Image (spheres, rainbow, N blue to C red):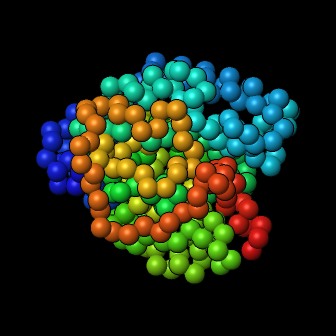
Amino acid sequence: MKPEDIIAHAPLVLTQAQRESYFTDGFVVAERFFTDGELDGLRELSARFLEDSKAVTESNEAYDIGPNHSPDHVHVRRLKKPVDRHPDFWTFASDSRLTEAAADLVGPDVKFHSCKLNYKWPGPDDLVKWHQDILAWPHTNYSPVTLGIYLDDVTTEHGPLACVRGSHERELFSHYDAQGAWSGYISDDDMPRVDLEQAVELTGPAGSLIALNCRTVHGSQPNQTDQTRPLLLYVFSSADAFTWMPAPSPTTKTGDIVRGATAKFVHMDPRPCLVPPNWEKEGYGSIFASQKVSEAAE
């Protein structure tokens, strides 16, 4: 659906001002959208999977492991496909309030795409360079939205997600390096065309919901605290958006309609998108892994 069609529907759980801010800026924060009681189960699951990761020595189907990981020092950058790791993650994904938030931003018919639980650990290793999500998983239109849930308070010192206001309506940048390999970030040569003066850090208390348009330029700085910053991320799209390349991290639920009805027609946005690698053949670890590999090759 087009933004003007989506916004014409009455809001469900977000305010009309929040929806308008999302479509204008390419992102929005709804503080304290979830209560501590709603988050407790997710926190317990997160702690359990981090504990289990101590037995893991390298990245695998479930974990993206950072360079400092050991049984005595956990450094999990990502729990992959949480909806396939425990049913409670899927229950939360298909919970009416989360799908209603998605519907407020993509329209009444909502499709599930993917999920991940990212961790930003203290220290300099987990910086994420500026990038745009849709380059890794292109769709026939640009409705996909990432909904992030803050399991803990997030301040500037935690290295929060930072988004460039209005960048979703501007250029899509190549995420390949000079050698033609996938880098997962915007090159230094292209960065002068990104207006970083419009960058906004998405801070907020635990329970805050952040929404990020798939075209929005975003990244994050290192975590300068002594606390780990978890961020649970779910990606949804309008039902009339269809992927045209293999998804980098498909789940058993990818493509499921979680609200409304299956689309009878596809919405084709005429704006082009660069073709990513064929992830079915080349494999995909995470954005952290892609960016680190590209940095090492420079």
Q: Position of residue 150 (x, y in %)?
A: 50, 36
Q: Nearer the viewer, residue 177 or 203?
A: 177
Q: Is residue 68 left or right of residue 167?
A: right
Q: Position of residue 211 (x, y in %)?
A: 39, 46
Q: Is residue 79 left or right of residue 24?
A: right
Whether residue 228 appears in this view of the structure is no
Q: Position of residue 222 (x, y in %)?
A: 65, 54
- Residue for point 56% across, 68% down: 175
- Residue for point 73% across, 51% down: 123
Quarter holding residue 277: bottom right
- Residue for point 38% across, 69% down: 272
- Above or below, 225 against 131 in this view is above
- Residue for point 42% across, 60% down: 216
Q: Is residue 7 left or right of residue 194?
A: left
The quarter of the picture where the C terminus appears is: bottom right
Whether residue 77 appears in this view of the structure is yes
- Above or below, 153 against 125 in this view is above
Q: Position of residue 35 (x, y in %)?
A: 42, 24
